[in-house]
Amino acid sequence: MYSAVKILNFLLPVLYGLTFLVYLYDFVKEKNRFSNSKRIFLFVTLIFHTFYLLARTIDFNHPPITNVFEIFTVLAFAISCSYFILELLTDIRGTGLFIIVFSLIFQLISSCFIQDLTEVREVLRNRMLGLHVISALLGYSGITISAVYGLLFWILYKEIKLNKFGLIFERLPSLEKLEQLSYYSVVIGFVLLTIAIVIGAVWLPQAFPNFNYFDPKLIVTGFVWLLYGLGILSKTVGGWSGKKVIVFSIAGFCLAIFSILLTNFLAKSFHSFY
Amino acid sequence: MNLLAVSINHRTAPVELRESLHLSTEEIKIFLKELKGSIFSEGFIISTCNRTEIYGFPVNPRTNFKDLQKFLIEMKPVGSITPENFQNYFSCGAVNHLFRVSAGIDSLLIGDNQILGQVKESFQISEEFDFAGFLMKRIFDSAIKVGKRAKTETVISDGAITVSYAAVQLIEKIFSNLNRKSALVIGTGETGEIAAKHLRDKGIGRLSVTNRTMEKAEKLAGTIHATTVPFQNFREYLQDYDIIISATSAPDLILTYDDVKKAMKKRGGASTILMDIAIPRDIDPSVRSIDNVFYHDIDSLKIIVDQNVRKRQSELPKVQSIIMEEMVNLFGWYNSLEVTPTIKSLRQLFEDIRMEEVEKIKNKLSPEDIEKLELVTKRIVNKLLHQPTVELKKISENGVNTQESAMKVNVIRSIFGLDHES
């Protein structure tokens, strides 16, 4: 099993790279032989990735969430898996490369620096923590995908406004579709983040004696959650649409990532494990 | 292959002439009735607004293009027609032309989507008349294959190449589902009418038209199931529409920046498309600076059209190579048809020679010796013909290398004088 983990750790960036190249080729070249088969590349990559995550969990006797590079591989998987489901549901195939590139980057960093830890703090072996982290990561994948679609919307919006009818214009789906994709991803992301927060709120006080509701990480997460909640409300209740919603989504994402990085690396928190 | 074809098309004849030579389905049927048996053994006629073409295999080998031209002129007398208005094709040339037509690369608008359907229809009429034999059917199948391959393997038919269709393409890049959208067409001249019809064809949810002369607006609305809006106060309804196409002949702007700004406020900033396809322009171009307003005039639509035309032109070599592949397949198959008769003739020739020689000495031999001689000579003939027969059968089985097949069959027929024998 250990050798399988080693091989897959090397193989996964290659598979993501290959899948990315196939999606890129399909984006640049119309009516090519990969138009229909490219999602098979992604599917195979995800199967290997699933096996890798399971193998790591069994081999090291803890879910792969104990250090930042394990988190990165789960994040790479979550992003591509969410995209794969989205592609199957919507049959919009021209945007994959913009999403898969994130998985490629996360997996590449993870594969280069990941450590094989068998000794971890007992709390990190807890199943509730596993659920909490997985739902949080899927939630962040959702908002990442939403931001990517938001960015694509923004680019296409500018191209149409400026009468530039190049590759982006030809290959991307309609603005309305991109807005919808961005919205659906953010709603799914928001729901999963809510689940992560609820699990955290119930379980954390029991698991950590030094638990504190005013912990910087908790405050930032709450702030991000509130921000996205407001964004969703502005569309559903306030009737916002088009550029305004997209700007909100991209700004929200940038703010969320910035705050999370800041609290992770600068602030002291009981919620840090590595 | 003695396929004969004449064509009058957009390259050879002005639109008036093409119009007067256009044949309805009923006329095509009458023409086919006349052609069948007297001029052609098999054939078909294609007639569209841009071409009238007759294809067929002549009954009499001496029938030529002039006979076909004469037939067409007699059946459909048009005063101004001259031989220069015809393009004439024979054998490979005729097949190549038919393939080009099916692929849409011989059309006025390169990559025309409708022509393949029209070719199919022409052939169906011919089949109804029992005027399409196995050879014509094979040619037709290949022509349809070329058309389909050109559409699926290349982008020869992709993208809008007319301004009104480019407007629709652009609209579809902004809104995903036109069923849930509303549109207002201002001006019911030719351009406005085409744009309104395109929107209706694309399944627009709600369509309204307005025009300075309301009767015209009502007339168009009736034909495309649209509603009308009074021209005097159409600005009051702007906020109700997601798409506004303006194509009037007004000398001044009919929609100002303030009109659009006000409408956008009432719409809560929801995206709006303004297509100004009028010359001079109807809408103030500065409206493009308003958020979620997509303003496009005829120049921006022309950019799309020009790009698509260039893209289609760059696909021509790919389509031509598809045509060439299918021609090689067709003629390979066709040449293989000549193989079986050649083998038969060759064996017959050798058998005749053998029998003739045996006959000459038959009287000098006993019945047992004759029997032996028959056996020996038959064996010799069989051994001599074994290799050529195997070689010819190979051509028939592979049937793809046209030139090589034709050459081998022709060499054998020529050196053994098989054509002369038959």
Image: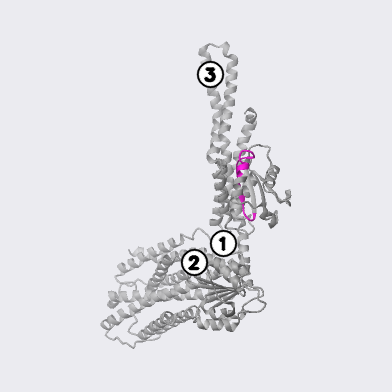
Q: Amino acid at mark 3?
A: Glu
**Magenta span of residues:** B32-50
Residue at the outermost front position? B215
In the image, which disc is placed on residue A94? 2
Residue B170: x %, y % from top left: 56, 70
Q: CA distance from mark 1 to mark 2?
A: 17 Å
Q: Does B37 appear in magenta?
A: yes
SS type, badge 3 = helix
* Residue bearing the label numbered 3: B374
Q: Chain ID for label 1?
A: B
Residue A84: x %, y % from top left: 41, 66
Of the pair B19 and B228, the residue shown nearer to us: B228
Quadrant location of the N terminus of chain B in the rendered image: top right
Q: Amino acid at mark 1?
A: Asp
* Residue bearing the label numbered 1: B158
Quadrant location of the C terminus of chain B in the rendered image: top right
Classify A183 as above or below B314.
below
Q: CA distance from mark 3 to mark 1?
A: 69 Å
First of labels 3, 1 by sequence position:
1
Q: CA distance from mark 2 to mark 3?
A: 76 Å
SS type, badge 1 = loop
